[in-house]
Amino acid sequence: MSVLTAAPGAAPTGEEPPDTGERHRLTAVTGLAALSLDAMASVAYGPEAIVLVLAAAGARGLGFTLPVTLAIAGLLAVLVASYRQVIAAFPDGGGSYAVAKRHLGARTSLVAAGSLVLDYVLNVAVAVTAGVAALTSAFPSLYADRLWLCLAVLVLITGVNLRGIVDSARAFIVPTVVFVGSILVLIGVGLFRSAPVSTEAAAGHASVLSDNATTVGALLLLKAFASGCSALTGVEAIANAVPSFKVPRAKRAQHAEIALGAVLGVMLIGLSVLISRFGLQPVEGVTVLAQLADASLGHNWAFYVVQFATMILLALSANTSFGGLPVLLKLLARDNYLPHVFALKADRQVHRHGVLALALVSACLLVFSGGDTNTLVPLFAIGVFVGFTIAQVGMVRHWRLERGPGRHGKALLNGFGGALTGLAAVVVTATKFDEGAWLVVIALPLLVLAFETVHRAYTRIGERLGLGRIPEAPHRDRSIVVVPVSTLSRLTCEALTAARSLGDEVRAVTVCYPDAEDRAQRYALERAWADWDPGVPLVRLSSERRALGRPIAGYVRELAASAPGTRVTVLIAETEPERLWQRLLQNQRGAVVAHAVRRDTDAVICRLRFRLT
Amino acid sequence: MSVLTAAPGAAPTGEEPPDTGERHRLTAVTGLAALSLDAMASVAYGPEAIVLVLAAAGARGLGFTLPVTLAIAGLLAVLVASYRQVIAAFPDGGGSYAVAKRHLGARTSLVAAGSLVLDYVLNVAVAVTAGVAALTSAFPSLYADRLWLCLAVLVLITGVNLRGIVDSARAFIVPTVVFVGSILVLIGVGLFRSAPVSTEAAAGHASVLSDNATTVGALLLLKAFASGCSALTGVEAIANAVPSFKVPRAKRAQHAEIALGAVLGVMLIGLSVLISRFGLQPVEGVTVLAQLADASLGHNWAFYVVQFATMILLALSANTSFGGLPVLLKLLARDNYLPHVFALKADRQVHRHGVLALALVSACLLVFSGGDTNTLVPLFAIGVFVGFTIAQVGMVRHWRLERGPGRHGKALLNGFGGALTGLAAVVVTATKFDEGAWLVVIALPLLVLAFETVHRAYTRIGERLGLGRIPEAPHRDRSIVVVPVSTLSRLTCEALTAARSLGDEVRAVTVCYPDAEDRAQRYALERAWADWDPGVPLVRLSSERRALGRPIAGYVRELAASAPGTRVTVLIAETEPERLWQRLLQNQRGAVVAHAVRRDTDAVICRLRFRLT
């Protein structure tokens, strides 16, 4: 389903984890299971998308389900063949971003990256809604609450990802095998039946079949084709993850890719044959797949197995976005197209931002769609096809530069694939523009613009910092440390000790307000200071407007201006209480002073925490 | 309405602003206008509260409106006389918190403070709902949206207070005079009419009069009395603000207090006479005051003047909580009962927390009540009467300690007042317990508990810090500065310059991860470091788990342990970008390192911001 799937157990870019030996890498069979999850899962909503469009032309329209599916299977064959070539040409993992970056220039690669980002986000929303639709088809009483169910599933997946999960190829194999197995059994059994064995799931639901059967126009067929193409999402995942395979990597990956195409093609065609044979009509609240399970296997335990397998596979497929998007964001951040914080894999809290952002945007999409898969599928297909097209066009360029045998034929194949997917992108955008595709048409250029703006800013910052040049030699300045003081305590002693250790000269400052109470406090402080005699002058700053930060910042500025070549440091001492809630008891003077000094001066700010234990 | 009203233009505790000369202080007349706002505004909901209770006993019950009001006016007279004595005894401002603190011990003063806090919060909710009720009485079509209107008014008041307002006694005079004037005209005109001149506002609204007229029991009368006592809120405001008056302060304040009592008494009795004369019945969606305006003045411009004056006065009265609560919180924070941040009046962002917290709690109350004044009024009255009672009991104690003429009579008067208000507190709590009073009964002890917990924590912290003792003399330690480094740039040079200025010894550290890409980067850094030769060693720390903060914190801990008597400082250098949005581009390495070092070590953390301009 997703386009730049992070191979479970190994990242697509191959740079980590290096300790993973050859033993942990994928064979053609385990690779198929681990990486085809998303593609297989799209069987749950692809055929449905076709049937729903054709239903607008009544029963006559539904008769075209098989031909449209065959056209999609043809496109699948071309794509698989094309990606076989991508695997050979980009053995380090050839996502559309990587291909475009090498062959089509920065901006096109950013378009590819933007469409990938959109796909990851939409993948979550589509998979969650489709998974919940599988559940509500089995338990119709839950249908009214589908949006809440979707959000609950999203919260669950987000929670799991926030805690951190151990990716494991093996964990993905079982549900994929169960799902594919049950679909194949469904198809096999169904082919031996001449009529539905049960229609119980669909009973009582309103049919969405159009009453006034119109003629079946070319536009409708195009629309059905475009919608159905959502079933093709995910076929590029294997090409992205070549480094995760065992040696010979490219060969094994190619085998897995072809096997993926074969299984996916068989499932798509098989399901559409059954749809035609059973004269199935789309009804509200029950998925086409659920109806097929009913019709072929009966409304018994087998039906529930199919529904649960579908739901779990879709939930896992939503989960892959949470693994994959951070990898993409890291690549973009390394190339200075996104804030560097995304490239900082080091500490967990940073990763958290990405997971939460993805969850938030997905939640908005879920609410926007009302938990309905078919609202989201057209949005999804656009980004996928933009990515496909860019990868194929990049491959044509690749073959033009490459000098090898049969390069013309290969270029032709990729060119043909690119033309088909480009056409599909145009068709799906045009036919679904009013139904939400405009959102993608707006979002994609905005994303590219954001990438470029970030890149320009980094370039400017890099120039200012003299990155890549040897800087001038550091020297030693005279150092004055300013210590804000308000009362006398062990904390003050600690602060002055630290300040004297750090500075050649130390000055304590206290801010006075023009009111009686404060005046009394100040006299007390000055008397105590004189008694204490710490060898540090106490400078009195007055503030008419009861400000605390500004007077200190002003003093620091004056000090820096009056003594050039002197480094002024402000040392702020605070207590660190025993218990967490006692942080509320801190007076925030430190934060106020630090904020003002940071805003108004270039002084170094030191913060000393005095532990109260 | 509120209990410890901040005198507009001058704070009640008299310690600020000291530059305000005698010229800006209040006379009896301006003081009455400036400080009586809350008390006057309670006329808008006090009589209504009585009528609503009595309506449960049908028309016969409503016949008791005047007797109940007379009883309340009697209590008002006692209260005014009592507060005249409070003014004389506490010329520095005698809120119930101040009186209790001096005469009744810490815990009682905290009960007084807790009830004041609750009053401030409830005052906002009651005034906003009553103001909106005045509006929807004039424009019935808005009635359905009253909760949203309440929240909108709250947002408006909050917004104004977040921006900061210039308090001015004068700004309060005009609306108060217009309101009192229009109520007096309403009463005067109404006394000359024998029947309502219009009932248009009430037309079409459902009567809430009980059909089965029961006997009028003592409990019902007590309940009506207790509800009506909400009209007495605010009579203590003048006593709290004595320092804001011109010399002779106490005399002028006493005159203002008596005038307040007289005007409030006349309005209450006048309105209840009219209620009886016009045989007025409470109806849903129209306030009693609106019905009276209708009946007395007709449904014309005069009616709208009364409604608008009421609404504006109530909005201003809600606003006084935003001025008054921070003053109370400051007093409590000074006495170590609340986090000191509330006592830090200095910088604006601190004040903001209080305003937002007050707005949030008020919003919850508005939602809880559904925007209905009469749900909130009983909650309001409890806190007010607890405060009254504590102040009066404290005064009895005061007269026992004081040796002056007539002290027995004075003690008797305050004791009588205290007994009456104490009784009222018990009655209103008992009769309204199910209707929300339980909330106050739970909240008040919790508040007191919170105050005491905070106080204990501060006492312990103060002991640990040795507050009030002369600390030992500061000394000078040897200083090692650790500088985390990841690339080489002008920022690195700046960081090492600062570090060499601050430390006797400087060590640059870099964290390495065990992957190929990072290894390449590290070699590049080490080669560049050798070329640069800044005279500072580059220490390599390795992290298997791709952590950034922990290895540095661990190194700092080891360094501190290996060289006792040495002060270890971590200097984190970051760029300060030109534009605000570019902060997003920072890689957060600094924050991650600072967090880990702060958590795991006692090292001083220095942050240097390198401005990119």
Image: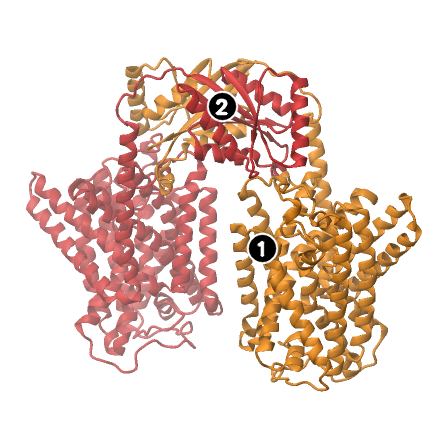
Chain colours: A red, B orange
* Position above or below: A346 against B136: above
* Position above or below: B571 against A277: above
Mark nearest the camera among 1 and 2 is: 1
Q: Quadrant of residue A435?
A: bottom left
Q: Residue B8 location in percent, x, y? A: 63, 52
Q: Quadrant of residue A100?
A: top left
The chain to which mark 1 is attached is: B
Q: Which residue is mark 1?
A: B359
Q: Residue B93 location in percent, x, y? A: 74, 47
| Residue A378 seen in this snapshot | no
Identified by mark 2, the residue type is Gly
Q: Residue A593 location in percent, x, y? A: 52, 33
Foreground of the two, B296 or B211: B296
Helix, strand or loop at mark 2: helix
* Position above or below: B41 against B498: below
Q: Quadrant of residue B107?
A: top right
Q: At 27% from the left edge and 78% from the top edge, which residue is drawn?
A: A58
| Residue A217 seen in this snapshot | yes
Q: Quadrant of the N terminus of chain B?
A: bottom right
Residue B520 falls left or right of residue A354: left
Of pointers 1 and 2, the one earlier in the residue sequence: 1
Foreground of the two, B475 or A7: B475
